[in-house]
Structure formats: structure tokens, C-alpha cells
Image: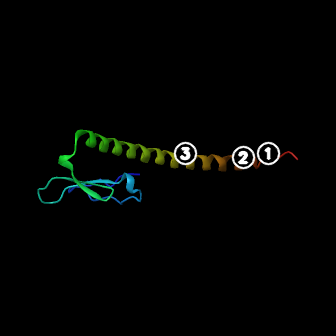
Amino acid sequence: MKLPWSSSQTPPEKPTNKKSTQANIKTSSKIESPVLRFNGKNYDANSLSDEILGLIRSLRVADEQISRKKDAMKVLAIARNSIGKQIKEKLKTVSPIP
């Protein structure tokens, strides 16, 4: 799951339905300060403390890791299904016990 981070250079991503982790940092085409959108509220990103900005970076890293792990799980599920099919095919030549 990736958070919908966006700026004027990149198109916005699809929003997620988990509002507790939604955070957007946006800048408009005009020269304005970036805005953090979190849980439906807007904040001036330039006025946020280093601690909050660090937490936002940590949230991004966590979301990236979750996304990678989900992708890995999909690959493992495909491999598992393939192995199951191979076992089924190989067992056709083996007589089951009564």
C-alpha cells in the first residue's frame, strides 16, 4: 500500500481507504509553501517540526516496505500454486494406498 504522496511534478496516486495513514504533501503550480494533508486536515509543511517530518518519512518507509512484502507474497502464492500443480501431475503416475 502506497500513500498518495504528490507534488506538482508527479500525478496524484489513488487514495486509500485507510484515513488514519493518509498523508499528502502537495504544492500548487503557484509558488506556495507545501501543504501536508493528513486525516482530512491541511497543515503548512514548512511549519512542521523535524520530529513530525521524521515521522512522515518513517510512515513512507513503512508503506514502501509493506508494498514490497505484499508483492513478495503474491510471487510466493503463484509459486505455491505452481508447485501444487506439479505435485498433482506427478502423483498421477503413483498409485494411492487404499
Q: Secondary structure at mark 1?
A: loop
Q: Residues within 10 Å of mark 2 (few under 14, many from 20)?
A: few
Q: Which residue is mark 1?
A: 94
Give the spatial CA distance, label 1 vs label 3: 27 Å
Please tell me which of labels 1 and 3 falls first in the chain. Answer: 3
Give the spatial CA distance, label 1 vs label 2: 7 Å
Q: Is residue 58 placed above or below 8 in the rendered structure?
A: above
Please tell me which of labels 3 and 2 falls first in the chain. Answer: 3
Give the spatial CA distance, label 3 vs label 2: 21 Å
Q: Amino acid at mark 1?
A: Val
Q: Residues within 10 Å of mark 1 (few under 14, many from 20)?
A: few
**Residue 49, position as x, y percentages in the image:** 22, 42
Q: Which numbered circle lies on residue 90?
A: 2
Q: Which residue is mark 3?
A: 76
| Labels 3 & 2 near each other (Cβ < 8 A) | no
| Labels 1 & 2 near each other (Cβ < 8 A) | yes
55 left or right, relative to 82: left
Q: Residues within 10 Å of mark 3 (few under 14, many from 20)?
A: few
